[in-house]
Each structure stands twice: as C-alpha cells, then as structure tokens.
Image (tube, rainbow, N blue to C red):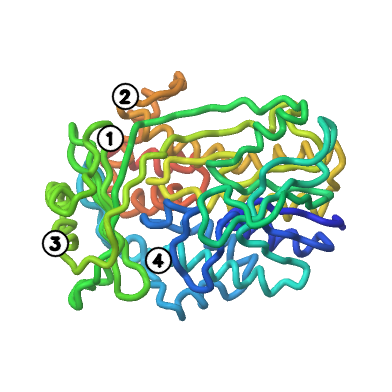
Amino acid sequence: MVGSVVVLGSGMAGLAAALVLAEHAERVTVIDRDHLPDAPAPRAGVPQSRHVHTLLLRGATELEVLVPGLEASLEQHGALRLDWTLQHLRSTFGWAPREPSGLIGTFCTRDLLEYQLRQAVLQRPQVRILSGTEAVGLLGSAERVRGVVVRERGADGPAGARSGSDSTLEADLVVDACGRSSRSPQWLAALGCSVPAETVVASQLGYASRVVRRHADAAHDGALLTAVRSDPPSTRGGVVYPVEGDRFVITLAGIGEDVPPHDDEGFRAFARSLPGDVGDAVDGEPVTRIATYRRTQNRWRHWERGSPAPLGFVAVGDAVCCFNPVYGQGMTVAALHAAALNEHLRHEGLDSRGLHHLRRRIAAQVPDAWALATLEDFRYAGTVGRRPPSTRAAHWYADRVLATTVRDAVVHRRFLEVAQLVRPRRDLAAPAIAARVLAA
C-alpha cells in the first residue's frame, strides 16, 4: 500500500491513473490548472477536445474494467453504439465493405467521456481533486521526488495568475499525467537528474473542426460515421463523427500548406473537395466556431531507458508518448498505462528496482500504436524524423492490406482490430491473412 500520491493533470490519463491508485494508496490528490466544469464542456487545458476523439475498442474495454457500467452510462447520456464495419470508411484504395462484425464502438465527445470518468473518480473516498491549481515544480533531490510545488490560479486570470502564494504537497509518489505540455523533464533537470531521451516524428499535419446539428435523416443502414481519405497525390482527409445531442463533429485534415482553413467558406470548400458525403454534413447548422490544431507530432519520452528519473516519480499517458491525434490512439494508450500501473502495484513495490520495472511496463504499451501512427506519417515527404530501415517494405505490405480491405471483409475486420489495438500489429501478417492479401 502506497501512502500519499499526487497526480498531475485530470485528463484521461490522470483520471484513469487516479482510479487505479485509489485501490492501492491511502490518499490520492489530483491537481489540475483548469477550474473544472460541473458538466461536460470544453476547457482550456484540453484544446484538442474540440476535435474528433475516438475511444478505440481496446480503450473502451480497459476503462470498463476500471469503471464497470461506464459504456452504459455514456449511452444513457446520449453516446451512440455503432458497429464499426457498418460505417462509411474510405482509404485511398476505395470504400471498405459494410457487413456486421460485432465490433461495437462508443461514439461521444471527449468532454462527455472525461466528465463521466471524473464523476467516477470523485466517488472514491481516497481521492480529492484540486482544480485551479497548477504544478510549478518538484520537491526532492536527484535520488527521490518527495512532492510538488503548486500555485493556486485565479478564477478568470491568465495562466500563472495567483490568488495565493506557492505551497507544497508532499507525496510518496508523483504521477505526471500533464500530457504534451509536461514540464517534468525541466523540473527533474533542476533537481540534478538526467532527462529522458526523446524520439520525435512530425508529419506537419494540421486539422480543423466544427460541431454541427445532425440532420433528421442522417442515419441510414446503421451508418452515421464517415471517415475518408482523398486519392493521392492529395493528402486531404476528413471525418464526420456522431456524438451525443444529435450532433456531428466534422474534422478536416491536411499536410503542410494544404491544411483546412478556419473561415467558414474555406472550411466548407475543403469539405466538398473530399469523397463521400462530408460536403453534405458540413452544411448542417453550426453549433461551434471552427477550431484548428497543429500540435500533431509524435513524441516518445523514453523514461524506460536507464534510470533518468528518481524514486517517487512516474509518467503516464501523453507525458510518456503522445501520438498524432488524427489516429485516435491517445486515450486508449492512457487506459493501457493505467492497466499497467494496476498490474504492477498488485505484484511489485515502488522501490528502485520496482519503479524501473513499472516504467518499462508502461513503455511496453507504446510500440504497436507508435508503429501504426509513425508508419502512416512517414508516407509524407515533409515528415521530420528518423525512418526505420523497414519503412519501405512496411508501406508495401500495408498498401496491399488496405487494397484488400476494399473487397475482403475478413481482412477488413482484421485491419480494424489491429487499428483499434484489440490485436497486436503482427496479426496483420498472420499466415491466413497474409495469404488473402498476397492472393488479392
């Protein structure tokens, strides 16, 4: 049993970690710089929530273990349950076959999912959430982190605005779930620690999103989702994603200079340039302004290599590895990190050896998602990052898999299972699947 734990960040990774730690610690304090809303709503600390968020099938399974009944609760609040293979999905090779598969996904906004998870956390008596509280440093030494320095933020002030002086929160364990913006490497360097090595792959992708009202006749043949890619050499793509409240989130994406505009006319024109009915959906009644996002690089901080971090500290979620959000892997990998944390705390302690094992266990949840995301990003000439020697061969086989999914429901299902992290990536090359792909 751990004594006191401080979790930095109340996003998906922080909340999932808090749910696990509530079973293994006497006290868990979650801090977040935002003043958290008392209903599902966007917040400043999660600007990407205004865009499409997909909870992959593996992530839904892991979160259901942490919060039994979560999917039913989401459905009660308007989330949709749809068969992935009945949706309109188009790769650069054409439209995928539409046959029932039983691969049922939950479709809702990030805001609703995070709110439901936060309510589950608040029901744990060992856990408290301090909103409007910003971590500004770590306490301790190069050998051990012993807590955090925090600053209370004014209700409506800018970042860092104070309504009180800095204070400290001592802890036996500090969990960094601050996401892409984590400053832990700098804080640890200030304590005299070495910082983790990083691997970065950046495709220069950008996207723009808007929420619109859903037409009354939008549902047909069990399909509400449309996800499309343009034919090469165009790099454009788009998603029309159904969410609670009879709404669609429309996210459009492009590479380099060809990113979707944030003005109404340009946004609509970009949508109409895509195959399928994205152009029809974009004419729905706007609910929100157009939001843009460009922080789409993949970044893996290798906390598992050597011993860059002291005792009393571990990172999870995007603070370990953030992915190009267009592939929808972040929330699921955060849930996998929570599962790894849970498994570790059941069997090992948090001494020097145990903590290093935990970091390695967390890192072990990354490679499949990382390979899927970066392999796709490496298709673009402007992508920054070191290409593995196997990239050309991997693209050759991946293209043949995608081409086969257009006319082979078995391969299409297997591709979705791998993309949804239900199966390991190697299962795409299993003999039975490889035979179908190469024969096609």
Can I make out residue 422 in this image?
no
Q: What residue sits right under mark 4 in the picture?
A: 107
Q: Amino acid at mark 3?
A: Asp
Which residue is at a point 28% across and 35% down the rendered structure image?
255
Work out how far the residue at label 3 is from the one at label 4, CA to CA, in angstroms.
20 Å
Label 1–label 2 contact, CB within 8 A: yes
* Mark 2 / mark 4, whichever is N-terminal: 4
| Label tally | 4
Work out how far the residue at label 3 is from the one at label 1, CA to CA, in angstroms.
23 Å
Which residue is more in the foreground, 424 or 339?
339
* Mark 4 / mark 1, whichever is N-terminal: 4
SS category of the residue bearing label 4:
strand
Q: Give the image location of residue 21, x and y in percent.
A: 75, 59
Q: Amino acid at mark 4?
A: Phe
Work out how far the residue at label 4 is from the one at label 1, CA to CA, in angstroms.
26 Å
* Mark 1 / mark 2, whichever is N-terminal: 1
Work out how far the residue at label 1 is from the one at label 2, CA to CA, in angstroms.
9 Å
Label 3–label 1 contact, CB within 8 A: no
What is the number of the mark on residue 280? 3
In the picture, which quadrant includes the N terminus? Answer: bottom right
Q: Amino acid at mark 1?
A: Ile
SS category of the residue bearing label 3:
helix
Camera-nearest label, 2 or 4: 2
Is 390 situated left or right of 307 in this image? left
Is 147 situated left or right of 336 in this image? right
